[in-house]
Amino acid sequence: MLAKLLSRYLKPYRRLLVGVVVFQFAAAIASLYLPTLNANIIDKGVAAGDVTYIWSTGVLMLGISLGQITASIVATYFAARAAMQMGRDIRDGVFEKVSAFSEREVSQFGAGSLITRNTNDVQQVQMLAMMGATMLVSAPLLAIGGIVMALRQDIGLSWLIAIAVPALLLVAGLIIAQMVPLFRTFQVRIDAVNRIMREQLTGIRVVRAFVREPIEEERFALANHDIMVIGRKVGSLFVLLFPLAMLVLNVTVVGVIWFGGIRVDNGDIEIGTLFAFMQYIMQILMGVLMASFMTIMIPRAAVSAERISEVLASDSTLVRPADPVYTFPKPGSLTLEDAGFTYPGAERPVLAGISFHAEPGDTIAIVGSTGAGKTTLVSLIPRLFDVTAGRVSVGGVDVRQADLDSLWASIGLVPQRPFLFAGTVGSNLRFGREDATDAELWHALEIAQGSDFVAEMEGQLDARIAQGGTNVSGGQRQRLAIARAIVHDPRILVFDDSFSALDLTTDARLRQALWRELPHTTKIVVAQRISTITEADTIIVLDDGRMVGSGTHAELLETSTTYREIVESQLGVEASA
């Protein structure tokens, strides 16, 4: 997964990567050439007393060192640029994919996990790309080139390389093998912390209302402690790796000095050659150590790449049709034909056998007990879910054959829990239609019975709205959401229990304004209060996911026991008589 993800998103930046390789190669060659020059200064300059040779070779070493530094800086710049742009592209890809998800996929992954995958996980892959573009190029060059150059200096000490390199690889391999499962667990723990934090921030009012702060703090502390435990284990392995690596490194240097000193004393090699060999073996082991460091990053990045790829590889159940229909021959009409829906893995359907028809301008009300399937039913209309049986037609077109953008443009949805975005009243209302004029916004607010409180806000249409609309009341939030849907100017308006926070007087005025100002707009109303729906053209009664009644208020009082029980529970026996 990691290799596929990197190859896919680094492909547009091949030129930058080629630049990294070229400049890293130049830096490595320069680094490998310096010990040989140093040996020449000692053997040919210092030993012979040739000051001119020392100066000329020293100037050459200085020039090569400057070239090495410049090449390393340029290579690092290219690597950082490629990695940062790759990270940007991955985040864009994940965001676009998630934006196309239906509610089913979002629920499957979880909002907290999706956020982690698009932030922390992308960062892990991004850092690997940046470090890998530099270290994974220079490490093999230093290790292999160092071996070649060391053997050119003296073959008699090469057995030290044959011992030191495998020893360092063994140490790194044993420790890294223990890190791989820890990194996977660490990402899961981060998901848990994000989920708990999100729940506590979203439900802060509930937490405080039930005096659950100590319990929630303990819950967060437990998840936080789990991350700490995993992080401590990973840190302990890191702490163990580098001292052991340095031990191998230092023992190897001692071995070079010890056995090299014997060869110098015997006259087999020059003192400068010994120093060069020691520098080369240091470069070899540093190359191996850098490669080991990268292999530590690879497992964690691989886990993150797998999690990112799961999102990118997930196909939304909202499949766009191959030959979409862009125009609707019967704008405003709505038909459900034996529609049903079953959640994946569920033993029985949530909805089954739902059939009704609405002409443009009709008002269809949907009532039923909690869990009857009302919200699921209205979610089928804008195709937030796809029916698993039957069909849903909007404007005379099966929603599965309609272009999604055209479908959504014809439907205005006010969800059960209205959400406002951080910004202003005007920006939230224009979320439905960006080119709406101020006059159109005020007209929509008047219909939604929200013009009075907006006029009293500082700045009016420019009044600030906090994220989620937390700085306005529940009733104000509902009315702003209704106004936003009206500004959208759809042919079908869907209200999913959108009047629940309104008092009876405001509810009545809002419905009268809707009926009066939008006579040709089809209205689908899910409501708990019977007083909200008594004037609907058709009332659909749901019970346990099935239609148990359909008709006007008066007809259902005569024919539907379920509807009569709902009326009696709210308005009393006299109202149902």
Image (cartoon, grey):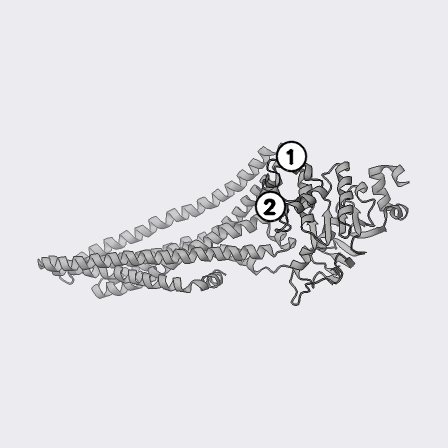
Report the side of 368 relative to 8 (left or right).
right
On the image, the x and y values in percent for residue 56 come to: 14, 59
The residues tagged by marks 2 and 1 sit, at their Cα atoms, a distance apart of: 18 Å
Q: Which residue is mark 2?
A: 427
Q: Earlier in the sequence, mark 2 or mark 1?
A: 2
Element class at badge 1: helix
In front here: 347 or 391? 391
In front here: 129 or 427? 427
Residue at 67 percent of width and 51 percent of height: 488
Res 260 seen here: yes
Report the side of 410 relative to 536 (left or right).
left
In front here: 247 or 138? 138
Res 262 seen here: no
Residue at 17 percent of width and 56 percent of height: 261
- The crowding category of the residue bearing disc 1, from other C-alpha atoms within 10 Å (few below 14, some 14 to 19, many at least 20), is few
On the image, the x and y values in percent for residue 504 come to: 77, 37
- The crowding category of the residue bearing disc 2, from other C-alpha atoms within 10 Å (few below 14, some 14 to 19, many at least 20), is many
State the image quarter where residue 60 is shown: bottom left
Number of numbered discs on residues: 2
Query: Residue 252: which disc?
Result: none
The disc labelled 2 sits on which kind of residue? Ser
Q: Which residue is mark 1?
A: 456
Tag 2–tag 1 contact (CB < 8 Å): no
State the image quarter where residue 446 is shown: top right
On the image, the x and y values in percent for residue 75 come to: 34, 58
In front here: 271 or 317? 317
Residue at 23 percent of width and 56 percent of height: 256
Report the side of 411 relative to 39 (left or right).
right
Report the side of 302 relative to 426 (left or right).
left
